[in-house]
Amino acid sequence: MTRFIKYHPRSNTYVIEKRAFLEEDLTLDGNVIVGPEVKFWKNLTVSGRLELGKGSIVQGNVKAGSAIICAAAKVLGNIETVSELVLLDRARINIAVCGGDIRVRPGCSLGSVKAGGTLELVGKVAVFSFFPVTYLVNLSSSRSLRM
C-alpha cells in the first residue's frame, strides 16, 4: 500500500499516485493530495486538507479538516469536514456534514447535506434532503434563503 504514497515533509503532505487501489482503511496525519482515478475500498481519514482527485471513488466514509472533491469523484459513504467542503462539477456524495461553509458546483449530487456555515449551490445541483443550515445561497436563481 505505501508504494502508492509519497510524503513531502516540508509541507506535511502525502501524495497518492494516480490509479492507485487501496483496500484497507487509510489514516494520514497531514494534508493529502489524491491523484485521479484512485479507488479506496474502505474509509479515508485525513487530519489536514484533502484534495480528492478527478474520478476517484471512496467506498467508505471520509473525515478531513477541509476537503476539495474534484470533478466526477464519488464518496459512497459519508464525508465529514471541520472547516470547509468544496464539491467540483459532477461530484457525488451520499451524506455531507461540514462545520463551516460548503460550496457545490454544477452537476453535483448530494443525498443529504448539513453545513455549519453557508451552503452555496451554483447551477443545477441535486440535493435530496437538507439538515438545518445557517444560510443557503442558490446562485443559479439569484435567491438566498435563510433556514
Image: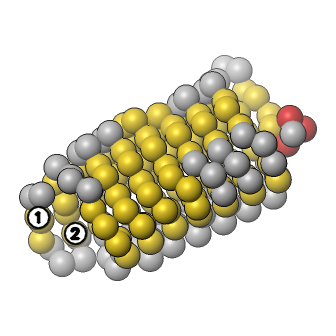
Image quarter of residue 125: bottom left
Q: Amino acid under label 1?
A: Leu
Vertical placement of residue 16 versus 87, above or below = above
Q: Measured along the vertical axis of the image, is residue 6 above or below residue 55?
A: above
Tell me: 109 left or right of 120. Answer: right
Mark 2, residue position: 138
Q: Residue furthest top?
A: 10
User: Viewer-nearest of labels 2 and 1?
Assistant: 1
Q: Please, is residue 13 above or below residue 100 in the view?
A: above
- Give the percent coordinates (x, y) of residue 24: 78, 42
Q: Residue at x 50, y 52 (%)?
A: 78
Residue drawn 82% across the image and 53% down it: 21
Measured as percent of width and height from the top left, residue 64 is found at 51, 37
Nearer to the camera, 44 or 123: 44
Residue corresponding to mark 1: 145
Q: Of helix, strand and loop, which one carries label 1? A: strand
On the picture, is 85 further left or further right than 71? left
Relative to 92, 36 lies left or right: right
**How many numbered callouts?**
2
Q: Is residue 13 visible?
A: no
